[in-house]
Image: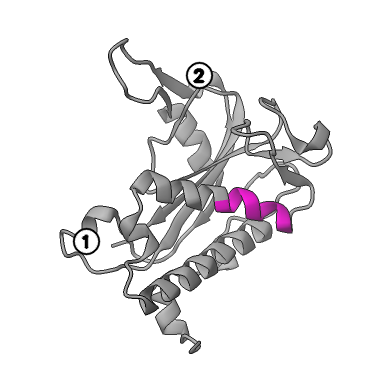
């Protein structure tokens, strides 16, 4: 397999620079900016590899044929699985759909719990605010924001763009930092809770990473 140049790789996914992290950010459980940076770059390397292989078969990039929510889920799940490789004081929650996603190491039996007060919930989003969850929670929330193509870009003839993380923010939120949206008996919409302005301001004040490039 031919080796891709740095320029070719950056056309698929842009790596992040540790210099763009906030050394003053408060992050719990021994997690560091360096741990997060290495995990983010592992994702950009993963996506570069996958999309380069898809290109050899004339298949669209992953983010151009997956539904947006599915791709965001992949980004978030990858970060949840990768961060514990670099930070040994936290582990992935092994309980299926357990909350939160990351737990303090050795605190819960088999590193699994359905619902815990300690830990970090991880989300990935194309949006700079208005992040959603399934329930209002007292939890430390970390959000990875990114830019990437969408499935509809194919039919709109929009050219492939490089995936890139735009920012990472995190803070301890309480229930009043969420607004709960129920649903009617006839609705099939997924029940969600959204981060309110108070929660957004907490997270922005404790920003962890902000990209220095000009966003398209």
**Element assignment for label 2:** helix
Q: Is residue 132 magenta?
A: no
Marks 1 and 2 in Cβ contact (< 8 Å) = no
Q: Which residue is mark 2?
A: 176
What residue occupies the far front of the structure in this picture?
57
Name which residue lies at 77% across and 37% down.
111
**Element assignment for label 1:** loop
Spot occupied by residue 104 in the image (x, y as percentages of width and height): 76, 39
Left or right for 120, reference 148: right
Spot occupied by residue 75 in the image (x, y as percentages of width and height): 49, 52
* Nearer the observer, 187 or 132: 187
Name which residue lies at 32% across and 24% down.
189
Q: Is residue 148 visible?
A: no
Measure the alpha-carbon separation of dots 1 and 2.
Answer: 40 Å
Q: Is residue 81 magenta?
A: yes
Q: Which residue is mark 1?
A: 154
Magenta span: predominant SS is helix
Q: Is residue 26 visible?
A: yes
* Nearer the observer, 7 or 26: 7
Q: Which residues are magenta?
A: 78-86
């Amino acid at each position: 397999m031919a080796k891709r140049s740095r320029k070719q790789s950056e056309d698929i996914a842009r790596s992040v620079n540790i210099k763009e992290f906030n050394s003053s950010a408060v992050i719990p459980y021994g997690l560091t900016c360096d741990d997060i940076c290495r995990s983010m770059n592992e994702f950009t390397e993963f996506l570069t590899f996958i999309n380069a292989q898809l290109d050899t078969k004339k298949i669209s990039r992953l983010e151009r044929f997956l539904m947006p929510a599915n791709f965001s889920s992949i980004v978030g799940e990858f970060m949840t699985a990768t961060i514990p490789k670099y930070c040994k004081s936290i582990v992935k929650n092994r309980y299926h759909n357990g909350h939160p996603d990351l737990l303090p190491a050795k605190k819960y039996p088999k590193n699994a719990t359905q619902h815990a007060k300690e830990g970090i919930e991880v989300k990935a989003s194309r949006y700079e605010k208005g992040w959603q969850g399934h329930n209002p929670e007292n939890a430390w929330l970390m959000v990875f924001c990114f830019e990437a193509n969408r499935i509809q870009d194919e039919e709109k003839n929009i050219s492939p763009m490089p995936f890139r993380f735009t920012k990472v923010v995190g803070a301890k939120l309480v229930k009043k930092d969420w607004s709960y949206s129920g649903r009617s008996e006839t609705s099939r919409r997924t029940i969600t809770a959204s981060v309110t302005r108070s929660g957004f301001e907490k997270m922005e004040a404790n920003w962890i990473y902000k990209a220095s490039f000009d966003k398209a």
